[in-house]
Amino acid sequence: MRRPIMAGNWKMYKNARETAEFIERFKPLVSKMDGCEIVVFPAAINIPAAVAAAGDSNVGVGGQNIYWGKEGAFTGEISADMLHAAGAGWVLVGHSERRHTVCHEADADVLKKTQAALAAGLKPVVCVGERLEEHKAGKTGEVLVRQFAAGVAGLTEEQFAQIVIAYEPVWAIGTGQTATPEIASSAHQLIRSEAEKRFGTEAANRLRILYGGSVKPDNIDGLMRQPEIDGALVGGASLDPESFFKIVSVAAPAR
Ligand code: PEP
């Protein structure tokens, strides 16, 4: 049985005070939910505030990005070790807003970042997903196979056992246009079959695959009913404690 993960990506929202306030309000709401893992991904500068507010609660904290170098002349970047030392336990890698906006992250960067995260003791959530034009052209499978091959297949079996994958169709992120549970489920099956080819059946069956893209309190139920969907990566709807609580509480007792 795969333990669900409910994760909130806060993107470039909230300052340190707002980050701490969210967690103070959210913690008691979820304190008895042990049916899933819960993680929030605040902006890097607010990680210490988030870690302090989360304390020893069941709310984990992660970063939204790292650079793969250990240290050096990389102005504006932070390393996996720095993030880990700040108290984060998780990190997003290859989010579409980093692949497809001004950051232009390449598929191969995703592998280097994932390896750096694992070496520092962080749990990476590797994001994959197709753009609207690729979706419309029926190229979802092709994109996912390419992203898996370049970003994940180069891991060792031991490394692969520690990662989580988030399937996030780019056309669903921040658009209000959620993938149907069936579309999401079939993408997850494809990712799992790629994992099986490279890492074997047992490892593929253990892999947790989250769905992300306009997840809201009123659509999480249908998504979490799909056995292939092991949790959610939630953007906009995770910014409010009550809304994120509603999403988490649908998921937690669902297994
Ligand atoms: C995300 O940021 O990963 C995301 C899925 O955003 P939203 O839920 O707002 O679509």
Image: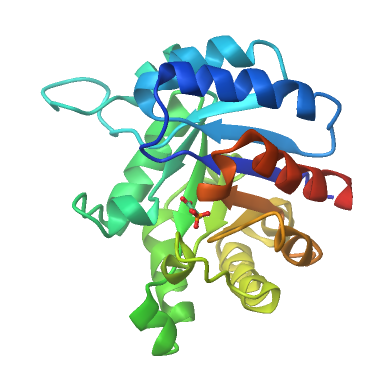
Residue 189 pos. (x, y %)? 65, 72
Residue found 31% across the figure and 24% down from its top: 79
* Quadrant in which residue 219 is drawn: bottom right
Find residue 95 and report its horizontal and vertical position in percent.
40, 51
* Foreground residue among 28 and 50: 28
Q: Is residue 10 left or right of residue 244?
A: left
Q: Nearer the viewer, residue 98 or 27?
A: 27
The x, y position of residue 247, in whole percent, is: 72, 48
Residue 40 in view here: yes
Tell me which residue sits at (45%, 13%) in the image: 48
| Residue under the point 43% across and 71% down | 171
Q: Nearer the viewer, residue 199 or 216?
A: 216
Outermost residue toward the bottom? 137
Picture colour scheme: rainbow
Up the image or down, 15 lies above or below 118; here it is above
Return the x and y of residue 54 as percentages of the image width and height.
62, 16
Q: Is residue 87 visible?
A: no
Q: Along the horizontal axis of the image, is 90 left or right of 117?
A: right
Q: Which quarter of the figure has residue 6?
A: top right
Image mark count: 0
Q: Say whether residue 221 is left or right of residue 129.
A: right
Q: Please, is residue 131 above or below residue 88 in the view?
A: below
In the displayed structure image, the side of residue 125 where residue 57 appears, left or right: right
